Amino acid sequence: MKRQFVTPAMKELCDQQVRYAPRAKRLEQIDRAERLLQEIEPDRTYPYEYICYRLTTFRPTSHVDVLLSGADAVHDLHLFVEDLSASVNLQADAVGEKVLTMEELSKEFNVSLKTIARWRQQGLVSRRFVFDGRQRVGFLQSSVDRFVHANEDRVRRGSSFRQLDDVEREQIIQRSRRLANVGGTPSDVIRRVAKHMGRSPETVRYTIKAFEQAHPDLAIFADRSAPLSEEAKQRIFDKLEEGVSVAMLARRHGRTRSSIYRVAREVRAKKIAELPLDYMANEEFTEPDAEQRILADPPMESKASRKSRAAPGLPPYLASLYELPLLTREQEAHLFRKYNYLKFKASQLRERLDLENPVTDLMDEIEEFHRQSLTVKNEIIRSNLRLVVSIAKRHVGSNANFFELVSDGNVSLMRAVEKFDYSRGNKFSTYATWAIVKNFARTIPGEHRQRERFRTSQGEVFDNYEEYRTNQRALENEQSRRERQISRILEHLNEREQQIIVNRFGLSGHEEPRTLKQVGEILGVTKERVRQIEARAMNKLRLAAAQEKIDAPADE
């Protein structure tokens, strides 16, 4: 049964009762819902007003025009019973009648747990009770009796299904062990044994599991049932990201496909939990129409935001900054509002993320909001890079490296985007200028002191005269040695990682280094994906260099 209400009005009603109805009232409503379930006919249509009155004895003032099909009404009433019973924390031994767990009901009717789950979908009403301090699904004896009375043929067919005898059980165990010993994975073994024995894979899986629990020292998949380490989980996730199939990873690690998917979800959830989602809060984020209004198209470009003409003779990096138009005050406010709202939405969704049982759809939403926020952040940064250059020009000195100042200023600009509160009405350029200048004031004197401390009387002489004694042949030999070392450690990377490293650093010998965006266009992926693969590849290269004992060249 899907754990979501089909009808929003029923979900709203359930939430209201869980939050505001007294405990005694909720218990009454659970009984009313179960009685109503016995009367619902799947081929009829029911007004929400009627269902609400039967559950609460009052007429609703909203959703009066909503109609529910019989099937939807049955589905939502089942969830209504489970959610309300979960909210009252009712002890199983305090009900006043016998309460059966899933396992007890399975033994009583001689059916599998899967059959019980199927009966729940077909009308068997379940509630949530507290058994030994833990909340679990349970069934009132009266609910079971009503279901059996209404579904005698279905129950009889389930109970009369042929159970495994000891001989068949032993055959399953022996055949499974033989296949596992020759390298069969759990999923392959279960499938082949089920086909040979004429049984369902679920029956074979349950039989093996029960045997291993009873005889842990004789386990069939002992070496493959141990928990995966965090490093192994990360490797599985990385391989999936690289495009390795789930089936191949399942065979390689001796796991089922479902366990591989589960590992991927777990690692992905941990990565999402570590995402930087701090935002500048604003009351307008919680307004009803916030998403539609804030995520709308930006204000139209005005004359003030036209591109500026670059001065002739500028380096390519500086000239490219003038290709982007400056932002107007309205565009700037729109982008900062959108940037913080996207992180707000991602943060709100992340609070609902269960790291033990993460939901894929929820993680997709969080990552999409985070991806959009990074896109907006990059747009803000690109539109303000000229500001960094203009400030760096004013602070560059005779001993300072201009491009080092620009690099430091870019880092300060990125931090300023994170901390800027657009709601105060200030221009971002004012705030960013203060942050960049403050950083320059802190770092530049320290760099000057470092240079002055290690200055020698011969330093200026060495700066002004070229060294003519360089041994060109020695340099060529050193270069050849380095190229061989690079080729050797590049072999530790896969083809995709090698292509990214070669393009990023211009290692092919006849091409200039490329940007993340340019490499992404070559490979057909985003520049963020290129950055992730590059970071992983660099870690591999560091380890490979350490193994090969490759160090920096010694001074001649």
Image (cartoon, rainbow, N blue to C red):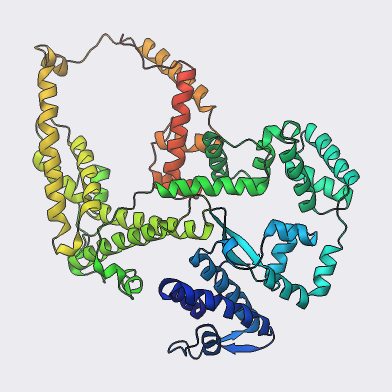
Q: From what the image shows, is residue 556 above or below residue 508?
A: above
The quadrant of the image that shows the C terminus is: top left
- Which residue is at the far right? 167
Depth check, front residue: 545 or 50: 50
Instruction: Please indicate, yes or no, whether residue 502 appears anywhere in the rendered image.
Output: no
Closer to the camera, 510 or 40?
40
Where residue 144 appears, x then y in whole percent?
A: 71, 70
Q: Quadrant of residue 512?
A: top left
Determine whether 322 is above or below 86 in the image: above
The residue positioned 57% from the left and 64% from the top of the image is 94
Q: Where residue 247 sits: x, y (%)? A: 68, 45
Q: Is residue 438 left or right of residue 337?
A: left
Residue 380 visible? The answer is yes
Q: In screen coordinates, is 45 left or right of 535? A: right
Q: Is residue 494 above or below residue 122?
A: above
- Name which residue lies at 45% across and 34% down: 501
